[in-house]
Image (cartoon, rainbow, N blue to C red):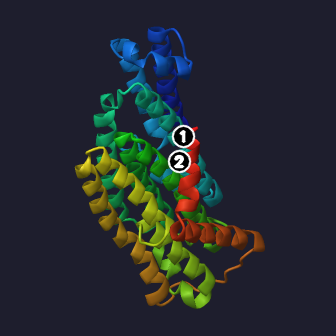
Amino acid sequence: MKYFLLGSFATGFIVYGIALVYGASGSTKIQNIIENFTTYSSNIIFILGFVILLIGFSFKIAAVPFHMWVPDVYQGSATTVTGLMSTTGKAAAFSVLIILITAILGANSLNLFMPYFAAIAVLSMLFGSIVAISQNNLKRMLAYSSIAHAGYMTIGLAAGNNYSIAGIIFYLAAYTFMNLGAFGIISIIEDENDGRTSLESYAGLNSKNPVLAAFMALFMFALAGIPPLAGFFGKYYVFVGAIEAHLTWLAIVGVLASVISVYFYIRLVVYMYFKDPVEQFEINVSPYSLTAVVISGLLVLLFGIAPDLLLNVITSALKM
C-alpha cells in the first residue's frame, strides 16, 4: 500500500510535468524538444514542467528525499520481487533520465539542472551509506545501499558529459548483476516465512555452504567498489566524468561515501567467515537459483577484469 500510494503520487508528478512541457512547447516529441530547447527554456512553465518531471523520476530511482518507500518495500516484498524492483525499475527510470539529459546536452544547456542532480546525489550517497550501517536486516541494508548507489549514478547526470553517461550505463549493468546475485543468495537462504534475513543468520555460512559464501562475498566486495570488480569501474567512470565536468568536489563526496559503505558490506563477510553459526538450518539450493547466482558472479568478474568489453559497446551506441 505504501508503494502503491507513493508510486501513484510520483506518477502524478510525471504526468503533470509532461502536461506542463506540452503546454509550453505544444509537443511531447523528444526530437522537437531537443531542436528547440534553447527557445523553450526561456519559458518558466516549460522549466517548471521539466523540474516536476525530474522529481517524479527521482522517486523511481529512490533518490533522497524521495526514498521513503524503499526500506519497507524491499523488506516487505518477496525477495525475488525485491531483486527485480531494485534493478529493472531503477534501470528503466535512469534510462528516461539519460534521454532527458541527452536532450539537454544537445542544446548545450546542461548546467540548467546540474545543481538539482548534484544536490540529490550528495544527499543520497551520504544518507544511504550512513543509515545502512545501523541495519541488521540484509534486505533493509541493501535497500539503503540502493539509495546510495542511486546517488553515485546521479553524479553522472550532474556531470552530463558523454563519458559520465557511458559510466551510468556501465554502472547500471554492473549493479544489476551485483544486486540480482545478492538477492538470489538471500532467496536461497531465507525460509518460507521470509525469515533468516538478519546478519546473525549468515554467521558461519562458509562452514555450511562455501560456494554461496564465496559468491556473497564477491557481490559485497563489488557493491563496495573494491577493484578489480565491476562495481569499482562503475564508480570510477562516473567519478572521472564528474572530474572532467569540473565537479571534482562531487567526486570527492562520492569517494567518501564509498569509504563509509565499505563497513557494512565487509561486516557481512566477517559474519560469514569469522563468526560461529548462531542458527542451525539446512540450505536447499535449487540448480536454477545456483545457476543464476553463478552467471551473475561471472559477469561481475568479467566486467571488472575486462571493463572495456562493455564500455566500448556503450560508447559506440551513444555515438550512433
Residue drawn 30% across the image and 66% down it: 260
- Marks 2 and 1 in Cβ contact (< 8 Å): yes
- Quadrant of res 50: top left
Residue drawn 45% across the image and 55% down it: 146
Q: Is residue 54 left or right of residue 170?
A: left
Q: Measured from the top left, where is residue 28 in percent x and y?
A: 55, 17
- What type is the residue that disc 1 sits on? Lys
Q: Measured from the top left, where is residue 149 in percent x and y?
A: 42, 54
Q: Measured from the top left, where is residue 205 in percent x and y?
A: 55, 84
- What type is the residue that disc 2 sits on? Thr
Q: Quadrant of the N terminus?
A: top right
Circle 1 Cα neighbour tier, 10 Å, few/some/many (<14 / 14–19 / ≥20): few
Q: Is residue 100 left or right of residue 29?
A: left
Q: Nearer the viewer, residue 172 or 13?
A: 172
Q: Is residue 189 left or right of residue 277?
A: right
Residue drawn 51% across the image and 8% down it: 26
Residue drawn 51% across the image and 68% down it: 304
On the image, numbered disc 1 is attached to which residue? 319
Q: Is residue 82 above or below residue 193?
A: above
Q: Which residue ends up furthest to the left in the rendered image? A: 249
Q: Nearer the viewer, residue 113 or 237?
A: 237
Spatial CA distance of label 2 from label 1 is 6 Å
Circle 2 SS class: helix
- Quadrant of res 251: bottom left
Judge whether residue 155 can be spotted in this image: yes
Which labelled disc corresponds to residue 187? none
Q: Is residue 220 above or below residue 97?
A: below
Circle 1 SS class: helix
On the image, numbered disc 2 is attached to which residue? 315
